Amino acid sequence: MTRPTRVDDLPIRDELRGQHAYGAPQLDVPVRLNTNENPHPLPEALVARIAERVTEAARGLNRYPDRDAVELRTRLAEYLSRGGVPIAPAQVWAANGSNEVIQQLLQAFGGPGRLALGFDPSYSMHALISRGTGTAWLSGPRRADFTVDVEAARAALAEHRPHVVFLCSPNNPTGTAIEPETVLAVYEAAQAARPSLVVVDEAYVEFSHGRSLLELLDGRPNLVITRTMSKAFGAAGLRLGYLAADPAVVEALLLVRLPYHLSSVTQATALAALEHTDTLLGYVEQLKAERDRVAAALAALGLEVVPSDANFIQFGRFADADAAWRTLLDQGVLVRDNGLPGWLRVSIGTEAENDAFLAAVKSVDVVTK
Ligand code: PMP
């Protein structure tokens, strides 16, 4: 029998050889707290509104969707403007998840012969999407407490002169938000070095104690802030991500996006969800309270907890994080092992899920002090 063909047997691009696909396990266990999803199903009134809006969209499915998603971008701009910084529809772009937004940014501003730099540990897809678009990736430094060290960042930017710089605030997997002064310092250093596009991934910003960085956009055309409806809006299955930036950045993305990339059904569903923003943000407040309760309970158990501005918590330290992960899984609780030695990450679930998680943690006795 011939052996099955492996990916590396194919004439695949060299930089993809030996790489691993994004792989958060999708296991069917009672308590799934591993992908930072929102545990609240959409409210029934919103489900009904989605059905109405999608029915309307279905009547026009013989036509291509609005290629530039103007109504959706207008509503997203209104949502963003709630923070007090006016954002115009021309400053907003939307795609199928913020991963696709990031991919489009890299298609336009990265690519072969270009370099992207991020500060690890951070969201692993920044590196993966970079490689997928032929952009070289460089992992920059963080302090031991996982914050971004401005001096070290300045040195890395001056030395490597990346074309695209990624920041993530609040950072996944560590949970901590970045101070606006730090973002500004990195932006200025990145401009002095090249200039380069600085992308701040704010996927979790609605869960933060602080403010969004939208106020930094004015006068900084190379700054991009990415957002998503997957977390705060509880709509990970919808696949709707977006960004705010200078209108010129949006114009640049029109050069690389596939025509009609955002289906009429997606646009209709996202518009329905935006009509229910207040209810959905109410769930965010509940999750923030649960996050603070779980963080305090973990600390009371003697664990180290990284301060979190997100809907997840990085906790440790374990002599063997993989063994701790398995002990939790044996009790039906799935958390995330990001491969960061000694640490695990738990997404905040419902009160009952969080209680089940905390009960399971008590049985893990591999903590190093
Ligand atoms: N950015 C960060 C920091 C994330 O953690 C995630 C999802 N885990 C994303 C972006 C992608 O989200 P989506 O594509 O669902 O918008």
Image (tube, grey):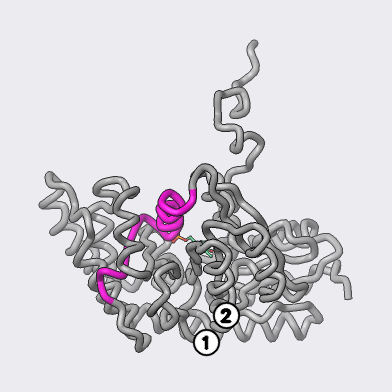
Location of residue 15 (image quadrant): top right
- Above or below residue 185? Residue 107 is above
Mark 1, secondary structure of its residue: loop
From the image, state whether disc 2 or disc 1 is nearer to you.
1
At 48% from the left and 77% from the top, the residue drawn is 205
Q: Which residue is disc 2 drawn over?
A: 309
At 66% from the left and 74% from the top, the residue drawn is 148
Q: Which residue is disc 1 drawn over?
A: 210
- Above or below residue 326? Residue 243 is below
Question: Residue 335's spot in the image, x, y percent?
Answer: 65, 63
Mark 2, secondary structure of its residue: loop
Name the main secondary structure of what is drawn in magenta.
helix
Whether residue 368 sits left or right of residue 276 in the image: it is right
At 29% from the left and 75% from the top, the residue drawn is 77
Whether residue 267 sits left or right of residue 2 in the image: it is left
Magenta-tinted stretch: 88-110
Is residue 353 visible in this depiction of the protein? no
At 40% from the left and 57% from the top, the residue drawn is 101
* Closest to the observer, 154 or 178: 154
